[in-house]
Image (cartoon, helix red, strand yellow):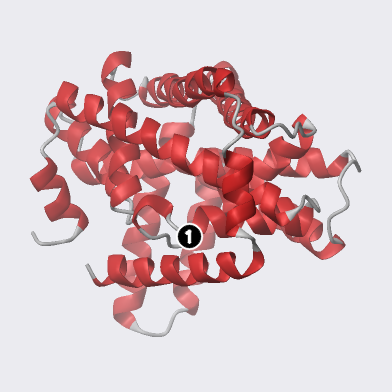
Amino acid sequence: MLKILINTAIGVILIFIWSRFVNLSQIFLILSSINLAYLGPIFIFLLISPIIRSVRLKIFLSNIKQIKLKDLIFLNGSAMILNFFIPIRAGEIAKGIFLHTEYKLALVKAIVWIFLDRFLDFLVVLFLTVILLSFGHFKLSETFQITVVTVFIVMLTITYLTVFQVKLAKKIIIFIKYLLIEKHIKIYFGRASLFILDSFSVLQRSPKDLSSMVGLSILAYICDAMVWYLCFIAIGFKQDFLKMFLGLLLSALTYLVPAAPGYIGSVEASGLLILSGIFGIAPNLSSAMTVLFHILSAIFVIIYGLISIFSLKINLRLILDKALKRK
């Protein structure tokens, strides 16, 4: 609860800072001229994206258990609404609990596998960002580009070692463990490292499966970028799609930062930073698109999430107890 309260305070501060850089009356004026014809396609892409990720999760878990695609689609919807209102990864915990109760997967491993699925998203975001930056179409600071490339190489190397070079990874763990001084830290580091190595074995897959998961991830992010692209068209200011694609990817990286319930503040602040600070779009225009995107996303998440929770009969009390560590 303390984390939620702190995140909420951060969200309020971000909203205040955001409001200092924009003209709210101008934003409302822009939003008053929305072309409603584009709302339908926006909601369609908002739905297609989690469905694609559900297919990816099915492939991801296929070597462990055959999960019904319908369950995974509703499970993603349940996770989205829980993460929306309880931004402490309650959605990932919900997925793990459901897979544990309905499909008899080990609870801790199920949760770790769900986070690995999200980690795959993170790798794809870094990969696509590196690809788009390499086009030279975007003028971002050299320091930022080097940072992104470095993080991607490091994460890719760690993933390769833990998945395909397990023996070498174990030797590295033993070496690091030897350097640690405190006995209890050594014990917990060793146990945690071996558990992670064991969990990462889920990615020891055929090239076909790995390429399918990466391809589906890319397709999902294209759908997400289409939402941004159509939101700009809806308010009458069409933008370059590749710019929206890169902006969406950079925005996805900001979700690593703690957020308030409903992502209040973080969406507006990151949108202003990326669209205006990096791409030079007028602050009022970029904020109008961000507000529209936030509103439409919230409507979609609530409807899709409630349908999903009732369809799967998710035990919210159990999830809240786990997320808030009351039990």
Residue 197 position within the rendered picture, expressed as x and y whole percent measured from the top left: 42, 48
Image point 25% across, 72% down: which residue? 2
Say which of 266 and 210 sits in front: 266
Q: Amino acid at mark 1?
A: Gly
Query: Can residue 174 be seen here?
Result: yes
> Residue 233, located in which quarter of the rendered image?
top right
Pointer 1 local density, CA inside 10 Å: few below 14, some 14–19, many at least 20: many
Say which of 236 and 277 sits in front: 236
With 101 as the anchor, is 63 left or right in this view?
Answer: right
Say which of 252 and 18 sits in front: 18
Eyeballing the image, is 303 above or below 286?
above
Image point 35% across, 66% down: which residue? 8
Eyeballing the image, is 193 above or below 299?
below
The count of marks equals: 1
Query: Can residue 158 be seen here?
Result: no
Residue 187 position within the rendered picture, expressed as x and y whole percent measured from the top left: 31, 70
> Residue 211, located in which quarter of the rendered image?
top right
With 50 as the anchor, is 175 left or right in this view?
Answer: right
Local SS, label 1: loop
With 174 as the anchor, is 224 left or right in this view?
Answer: right
What residue occupies the far bottom of the structure in this picture? 181
Q: Which residue is mark 1?
A: 265
Residue 104 position within the rendered picture, expressed as x and y whole percent measured from the top left: 15, 29
